[in-house]
């Protein structure tokens, strides 16, 4: 299927609905259903986030890994971070005590206070306060490798995730899922969709989830409600709305400590905060509304807006330092009250035309956002007289908490306007060229209400990219690209001047394979990324920073996924990532970037066949490997290598009844997923066993 003949899902749905009303006997369901067979094989053929168009993956001059819904279901993932092992080059970063998702792609990520950047249906979703993302609303996850600034503006050069959510269907359907497991895991999901009128379809997803953990006193609860609507106004116009409202509660858990640079001195279950602090509560809501209109067979337009609001509130007790005796851990008590609001607008026009023998697919767009963020933080630093300490080997909880003093009271405002263009050109049957650029105008101000000061910055940035694909055969394509990125640096230097933004540049080349039936695919890529204006300590005043650091990441990645035979479905990946500091005021050149393994890999295989009782069954297993990583930015200690084994099985008793079982970390290994410092190290979960029942009508 060529990109010129592929009709976008939403407009195809509108045309389908109108054809059905006209009595067309061969009218099909919306295209998202028709393409389900390809998705079942793990080998997706499209990733709309890569180009904002419906271009086949094999023609895109970029490494893209799509994690479809089938894979999410097979591994039993209920949170976004449980999918990270199944795409090469994605590594976990410090998750702010379990409060949100944070990851790196190709060595580069966000930071502890914002998490890594990701998109939901093409809108930035990481600004502000949102809980770790639940998978109930996810249709697929698009891992877009390399800089995304030419389309989406501010972002790290390693890559970005685009989460595509589940949309309403005009065919009535209901799914109910119940799941239970060890560590007090209880989960219920309801997913109901169908027509609400002649031209309108709706969907409602509801989630109630409770999880314990292998950590003492750490339990999480989530309540999520996600309504969505699709209105086919006519054969050429469609309106879509997607919303999410949720509450998430969990204690802020900084994990365990490394004693003299070594982990394992205390058990992975040891909680070093104060249970009486209670939970941190995250409340968030998001709303997206889009209107898409097909002006002709070759031209279409889209206007969309999004709102996201979030809040984070609660007490915590967090480690500060391990004393010389190797057992006394001083701690700091904190209270946070954070609020955020984010409004975004997008408008774009896509058209197809030819100039002589060259065929074009042109994208012109503009977007803007306004983001506000208020932070109130109270805390009390430990002292010799009042260390608020705990014995890591024999903890005693319930100490009288210290009174808190004001530490932070800020109000931040960001505005951005971006203009972008992209042209995808076809030169004959084999050559594809993608060229694009974006111009951003960024403004930021920060009011420090405690100090009575205000800092602001005004920045502009140009982010180009160019790529070439050569379709060597029906199965093989070769690609190469070069691109640039930018990301503003918040704050100011010792002179009160705003920092220059981070700038990155990347080059990539690779080869893609697609089987003739398009049910198996593989991508092999090599890359080199460099980033400058990274914040580092001011050599003249260690209490300030300057934008003078540089970092580099280069490596090789391989992703393979698909239906290799009638019975076997597989997915696997390997990554070698050499990510290091190349210039810094404190760190030596060559210091590895924190939490980035040089080598990582995973493989999973499922065997499926006709069941002797019922319809079908599947059994499978997998292995996940993560190599040694620097435990902090100074590389003062290391997180050890770990290898985990998983098994899974399902039984499709009938069209309506499915039973599943997932066992993760089968051999109950102790491992550490990420860290920020030697006193903030996050242990991974012990063996988890979950059994689920799905009823579909």
Image: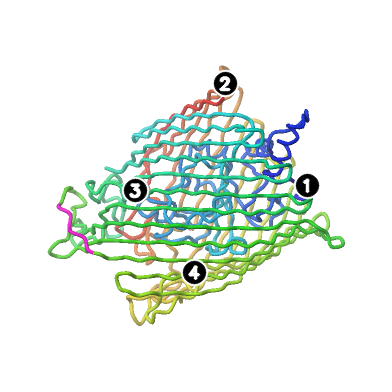
Between marks 3 and 1 in the image, the one whose residue lies nearer the viewer: 3
- Name the mark nearer the viewer: 2 or 3: 3
Q: Residues within 10 Å of mark 2 (few under 14, many from 20)?
A: few
Colouring scheme applied when the structure was drawn:
rainbow
Q: Is residue 147 visible?
A: no
Q: Is residue 557 left or right of residue 510?
A: left
The circle drawn on residue 654 is 2
| Image location of residue 340, percent across then percent down | 42, 57
Residue that label 3 marks? 281
Residue at the extreme right of the image, as rendered: 356
User: What residue is disc 4 on?
Assistant: 488
Q: Are marks 4 and 2 in contact (CB under 8 Å)?
A: no
* Lower position in the chain sequence, tag 3 or tag 4: 3
- Foreground mark, 2 or 1, reads 1
Q: Earlier in the sequence, mark 2 or mark 3?
A: 3
Label 4 or label 2, whichever comes before in sequence order: 4
The residues bearing labels 3 and 1 have C-alpha atoms spaced at a distance of 48 Å
The residue depicted at 30 percent of the width and 43 percent of the height is 218
Q: CA distance from mark 2 to mark 3?
A: 40 Å
Could you tell me which residue is drawn at 34 percent across and 48 percent down? Answer: 281
Pointer 2 with pointer 3, Cβ within 8 A: no
State the image coordinates of residue 391 (x, y, percent, origin top left): 18, 53
Tag 1, which secondary structure? loop
Query: In the rendered image of this protein, does residue 166 appear above or below residue 492?
Result: above
The residue under the point 77% across, 32% down is 22
Quadrant occupied by the C terminus: top right
Magenta residues span 400-405
Mark number for residue 5? 1
């Amino acid at each position: 299927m060529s990109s010129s003949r592929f009709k976008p899902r939403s407009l195809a749905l509108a045309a389908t609905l109108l054809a059905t009303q006209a009595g067309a006997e061969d009218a099909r369901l919306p295209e998202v259903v028709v393409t389900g067979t390809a998705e079942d094989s793990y080998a997706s053929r499209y990733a709309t986030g890569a180009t904002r168009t419906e271009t086949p993956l094999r023609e895109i001059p970029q490494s893209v890994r799509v994690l479809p819904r089938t894979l999410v279901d097979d591994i039993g993932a209920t949170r976004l971070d449980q999918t990270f092992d199944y795409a090469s080059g994605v590594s976990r970063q410090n998750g702010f005590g379990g409060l949100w998702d944070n990851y790196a792609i190709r060595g580069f990520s966000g930071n502890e206070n914002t998490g890594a950047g990701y998109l939901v249906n093409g809108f930035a979703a990481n600004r502000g306060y949102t809980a770790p993302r639940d998978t109930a609303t996810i249709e697929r996850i698009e891992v877009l490798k390399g800089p995304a600034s030419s389309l989406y503006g501010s972002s790290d050069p390693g890559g970005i995730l685009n989460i595509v959510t589940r949309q309403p269907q005009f065919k009535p359907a209901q799914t109910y899922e119940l799941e239970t497991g060890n560590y007090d895991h209880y989960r219920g999901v309801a997913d109901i969709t169908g027509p609400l009128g002649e031209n309108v379809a709706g969907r409602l997803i509801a989630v109630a989830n409770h999880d314990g953990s292998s950590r003492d006193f750490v339990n999480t609860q989530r309540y999520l409600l996600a309504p969505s609507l699709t209105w086919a106004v006519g054969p050429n116009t469609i309106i879509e709305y997607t919303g999410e409202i949720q509450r998430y509660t969990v204690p802020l858990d900084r994990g365990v400590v490394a004693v003299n640079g070594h982990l394992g001195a205390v058990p992975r279950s040891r909680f070093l905060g104060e249970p009486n602090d209670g939970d941190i509560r995250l409340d968030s809501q998001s709303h997206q509304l889009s209107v898409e209109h097909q002006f002709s067979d070759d031209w279409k337009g889209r206007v969309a807006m999004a709102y996201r609001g979030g809040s984070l509130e609660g007490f915590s007790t967090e480690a500060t330092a391990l004393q010389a005796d190797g057992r006394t851990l001083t701690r700091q008590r904190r209270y946070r009250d954070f609020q955020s609001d984010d409004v975004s607008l997008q408008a774009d026009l896509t058209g197809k035309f030819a100039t002589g023998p060259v065929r074009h697919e042109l994208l012109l767009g503009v977007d803007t956002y306004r983001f506000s963020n208020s932070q109130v933080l109270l805390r009390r630093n430990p002292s010799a007289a009042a260390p608020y300490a705990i014995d890591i080997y024999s903890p005693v909880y319930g100490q009288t908490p210290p009174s808190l003093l004001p530490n932070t009271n800020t109000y931040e405002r960001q505005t951005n306007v971006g203009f972008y263009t992209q042209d995808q050109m076809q030169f004959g049957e084999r050559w594809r060229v993608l060229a694009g650029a974006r111009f951003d105008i960024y403004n930021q101000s920060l009011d420090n209400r405690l100090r009575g000061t205000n800092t602001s910055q005004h920045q502009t940035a140009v982010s180009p990219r160019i790529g070439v694909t050569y379709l060597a055969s029906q199965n093989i394509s070769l690609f190469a690209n070069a691109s640039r990125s930018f990301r503003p640096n918040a704050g100011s230097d010792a002179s009160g001047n705003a920092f220059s933004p981070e700038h990155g540049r990347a080059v990539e080349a690779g080869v893609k394979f697609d089987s003739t039936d398009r049910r198996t695919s593989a991508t092999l890529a090599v890359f080199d990324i460099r980033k400058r204006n990274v914040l580092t300590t001011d050599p003249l005043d260690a209490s300030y920073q300057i934008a003078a650091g540089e970092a580099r990441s280069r490596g090789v990645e391989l992703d393979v996924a698909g239906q290799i035979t009638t019975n076997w479905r597989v997915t696997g990946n390997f990554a070698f990532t050499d990510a290091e500091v190349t210039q810094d005021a404190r760190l030596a050149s060559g210091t590895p970037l924190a939490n980035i393994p040089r080598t990582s890999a995973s493989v999973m295989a499922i065997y499926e066949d006709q069941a002797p009782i019922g319809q079908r069954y599947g059994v499978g297993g997998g292995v996940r490997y993560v190599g040694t990583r620097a435990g902090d930015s100074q590389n003062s200690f290391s997180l050890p290598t770990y290898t985990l084994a998983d098994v899974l099985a399902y039984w499709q008793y009938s069209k309506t009844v499915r039973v599943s079982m997932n066992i993760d970390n089968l051999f109950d290994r102790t491992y550490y997923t990420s860290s920020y410092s030697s006193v903030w190290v996050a242990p991974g979960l012990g063996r988890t066993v979950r059994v689920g029942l799905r009823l579909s009508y």
